[in-house]
Image (cartoon, coloured by chain):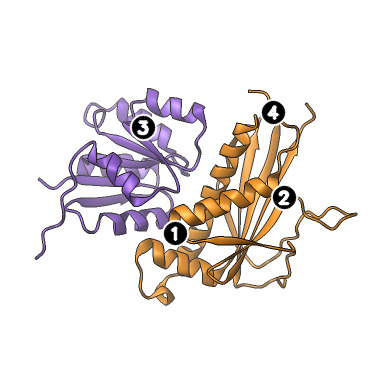
Chain colours: A orange, B purple
Amino acid sequence: MMPTTPHPDLGRIGGEALRHVLSSLLSFRATEETPVQNTAEAEDESLILATVDLIGEHCSGAVRLQIPEAFARLALGVLVGAEDTDSLTRAQIDDLCGELGNMVAGRVAADLAGEGHSFTLGTPGVVRGAGWLLKEDRTTHHAPGATAWSCQKHRILIEVSCHFQPL
Amino acid sequence: MTPTILSVDDSSTIRSLLARLFRPFACELCEASNGEEGLAVAALRRPDLILLDYNMPVMDGITMLRRMREDPVLKRTPVIMLTAESGCENMATVARLGARDYIIKPFRDEELLSKIGRIFPLLPRPTP
């Protein structure tokens, strides 16, 4: 299938994917926030970064999610029916974040396939701390593939980056 | 007889989610975290259904499904694939290998229960 548009709107696709996953999996409603800036302190251990690579024949990229640990704990408690979310381990929380990243990336890949760009997903990677800089445009300081979301009083960032080879 | 369901997924979140989902039903749930472990547990427990993740380390779901189809004991065991990827090529491979169905993650509880209900009835767990 040939790409229908040379530059898909990655910010929109990522945001819709995140909203879909939070709604379908957890029945959580997410609302978009502006501006999209990553104001988190580097080395903040309460923030979890999940990354899933998008691997394509003619294009490659990644989906990144920045999730507060408190949100991940709440979400996992809902998913597994745990009343005492304090007893959930760090490994369980990290696994949840990786799985959220995997599902969001799957949805992103499905949307991009609809625009003619096919990908497979890499294995989710999860790290602690906000050592992540949005890929801002140098002149506008706008990160075109990133959106910020408010959900259950927590702030979640998503960025979809992709390098498309010229058609 | 109580049906046995084997969940093969590298994500502890998904395995725990399934454990919570099946708690009210009269069924035995066993688990494995990759295809290799899944084949070993399946040979031992002879499950009535396998819920099989697509992408896993060590051995992925497609390889496990292929190995099952070559195994005279496991080749007829119904499989529902669970995947975050919805690519047509993947789905065609899954269908060719005889998976009974597939479900895209995230899924709603009732969606999975409905697919299982087409394979065998899930009855409520008797109260003690």
Q: Tag 2: residue type?
A: Gly
Kind of element beneath mark 3: helix
- Which residue position is annotated with label 4? A4
- Identify the chain of the residue marked 1, using the numbered disc in the image: A
Residue indicated by mark 3 = B65
Q: Pointer 3 and pointer 1: residues touching (CB < 8 Å)?
A: no
Viewer-nearest of discs 2 and 3: 2
x and y, in percent, of residue A133 in the image: 75, 60
Please name whichever residue, A135 or B53, is drawn nearer the observer in this view of the structure: A135
Residue under numbered circle 2: A145
- Where does label 1 land, which residue? A26
> Along the polypeptide, which appears first: circle 2 or circle 1?
1
Chain holding disc 3: B
Labels 4 and 2: the sequence-earlier one: 4
How far is disc 4 from disc 2 in space, using C-alphas? Answer: 19 Å
Q: Which residue is drawn at 45% across and 29% down?
A: B91
Give the distance between the C-alpha atoms of the residues marked 4 and 1, in whole angstroms: 33 Å
Residues flagged by tags 4 and 2 on a common chain: yes
